[in-house]
Image: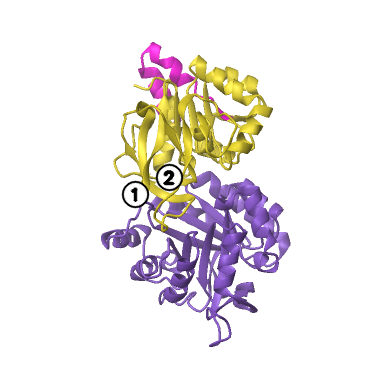
Chain colours: A purple, B yellow
């Protein structure tokens, strides 16, 4: 059987690793390549790099980061942020990433999901959704897709968008709760479960992971196939091994390397 | 790494030296995606390699890695167009050690449910599609899964029980001859994760993205003389 995956998200701005809390007040916490290598050596299952570089002329720096990671890290990783077209996707895949994360670009142009899936295969396309609880009764699922790091509402229903993304050719879905992101108080389990129960592709829980029990809940009650962590690893509160051992001891199938 | 190799050259008997000194690996490029990842993994191990789409290179190659991601059908079309299919078959016949990876593994069989085109037929059998009865088992089979080695092989020397490797695939190899299955994995059904015959060995998972377990397999392939025992 497949193991549940532990994935770490590295937010990168201008080639530096940063951690954002609710996507504002980003803090510089180091070099993304050495962080990636450290996590790889510690037994992490997968990595996500999110390029939050503001200006487009800095984007080439990200490709350098991707290439350097690919030389040193031998687990799968994906890259997202600022990818607008199949050409943008091709550049990061050629630089060494296995997958692309499509977010805002997919909302404004859903066709990019199917174009990327046709060009690179569904396994290479991850639909990343930023989601916020909607006002009561305003949307069928109760959750809304937001973009631009949560600053822009779209009026799109989160569950509708997940199903549509799958139909268009996404091979995985990241369910990122903007409400929970950075709080370290746990994943949005109800939302994660709802999406996981209604799509046939792997779901990655994101936003709010602060303690190993949060991951356990997301991977059981939340129905997720993988859990994304950031702060709890980046700030050294927990090690990859301590998180995995805990989940493994609680009976989840986890890839143990030590 | 380098010092180890020099040391082993100095200490191994002459008749074994030829396999150790010919470390150049040719990686087959047929627009199937992961040749660069394979090269980077070999670079990391200090193993010399070159990416090529020239059939002449494969004829002269000392060792060949045949990688691949994507669809078997388009992969086969490109292989044929470049004359790489014939080159691979003749290299295999000459005893050149060959490592197939993912789609490169699938194409070594006789055929596949993914395409009407005949495959290379270097290992007799077919590739079948996952059709899990359990709706919770999603296809493609994507992620880390455990290997069980059923037949000892030099390339699998370092694989320990329960070691996990990274898979991304919807089709899996099913050799006709049980003896061609070297290691298995389980996803609804038990399937062949590593197959091999004579100088050919092939993994359905991504050796180049399977962490230290995969790197060790690549390292062993780089020194394998093509003898399965």
Note whether residue B187 is visible: no
Q: Tell me if I can see residue B153 in this picture.
A: yes
- Determine which of the numbered discs, if any, sits on residue A179 in the image: none
**Magenta region includes residue A186:** no
Q: Which residue is mark 2?
A: B211
Residue A185 position, x and y percent, is 41, 77
Query: Magenta part of the protein: which range?
Result: B1-27
List the residue tagged with mark 1: A257
- Chain letter of disc 2? B
| Quadrant of residue B161 within the rendered picture | top left
Q: Are marks 2 and 1 in contact (CB under 8 Å)?
A: yes
Pick the residue in front: A23 or A189.
Answer: A189
* Mark 2 crowdedness (10 Å alpha carbons): few <14, some 14-19, many ≥20: many
Where, by quadrant of the figure, is residue A146 drawn?
bottom right
Question: Please, what secondary structure does the residue beneath circle 1 have?
Answer: loop
Tag 2's secondary structure?
A: helix
Going 42% across and 70% down the picture, which residue do you hit? A209
Q: Is B106 situated above or below A61?
A: above
Question: In x, y percent, where is residue B214?
Answer: 42, 39
Label 1 resides on the chain identified as A
Check the image and name the residue furthest to the bottom.
A136
Answer with the quarter of the image where residue A15 lies: bottom right
């Amino acid at each position: 059987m497949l193991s549940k995956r532990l994935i770490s998200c590295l937010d990168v701005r201008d080639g530096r690793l940063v951690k954002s809390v609710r996507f504002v007040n980003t803090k510089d916490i180091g070099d993304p390549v050495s962080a990636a290598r450290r996590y790889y050596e510690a037994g992490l299952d997968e990595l996500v790099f999110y390029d939050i570089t503001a200006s487009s002329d800095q984007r080439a720096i990200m490709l350098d980061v991707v290439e350097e990671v690919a030389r040193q890290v031998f687990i799968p990783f994906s890259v997202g942020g600022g990818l607008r077209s199949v050409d943008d996707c091709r550049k990061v895949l050629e630089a060494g990433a296995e997958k692309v994360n499509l977010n805002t670009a997919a909302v404004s142009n859903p066709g990019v999901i199917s174009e990327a899936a046709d060009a690179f295969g569904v396994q290479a396309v991850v639909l990343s959704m930023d989601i916020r609880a909607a006002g009561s009764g305003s949307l069928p699922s109760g959750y809304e897709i937001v973009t631009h790091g949560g600053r822009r509402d779209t009026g799109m229903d989160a569950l509708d968008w997940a199903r549509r993304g799958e139909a268009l050719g996404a091979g995985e879905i990241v369910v990122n709760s903007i409400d929970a992101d950075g709080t370290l108080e746990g994943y949005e389990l109800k939302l994660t479960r709802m999406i996981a129960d209604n799509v046939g592709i792997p779901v990655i829980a994101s936003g709010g992971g602060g303690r190993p029990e949060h991951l356990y809940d997301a991977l059981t009650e939340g129905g997720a196939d993988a859990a994304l962590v950031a702060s709890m690893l980046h700030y050294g509160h927990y090690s990859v091994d301590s998180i995995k051992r805990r989940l493994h001891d609680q009976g989840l199938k986890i890839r143990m390397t030590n | 790494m380098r010092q180890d190799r020099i040391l082993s050259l100095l200490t191994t008997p002459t008749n074994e030296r030829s396999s150790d000194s010919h470390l150049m690996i040719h990686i087959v490029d047929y627009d199937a995606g992961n040749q660069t990842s394979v090269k980077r993994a070999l670079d990391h191990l200090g193993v010399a390699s070159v990416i090529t789409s020239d059939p002449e290179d494969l004829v002269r190659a000392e060792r060949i890695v045949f990688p691949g991601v994507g669809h078997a059908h388009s992969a086969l079309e490109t292989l044929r167009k470049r004359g790489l299919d014939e080159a691979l078959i003749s290299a295999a016949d000459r005893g050149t050690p060959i490592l197939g990876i993912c789609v490169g593994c699938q194409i070594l069989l006789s055929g596949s449910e993914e395409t009407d085109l005949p495959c290379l037929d270097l290992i007799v059998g077919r590739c079948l599609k996952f059709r899990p009865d359990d709706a919770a088992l999603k296809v493609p089979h994507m992620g880390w899964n455990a290997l069980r080695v059923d037949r000892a092989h030099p390339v699998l020397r370092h694989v320990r029980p329960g070691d996990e490797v990274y898979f991304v695939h919807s089709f899996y190899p099913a050799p006709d001859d049980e003896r061609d299955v070297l290691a298995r994995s389980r996803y609804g059904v038990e399937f062949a994760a590593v197959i091999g015959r004579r100088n050919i060995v092939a993994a359905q998972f991504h050796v180049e993205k399977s962490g230290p377990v995969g790197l060790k397999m690549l390292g062993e392939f780089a020194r394998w003389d093509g003898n399965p025992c």
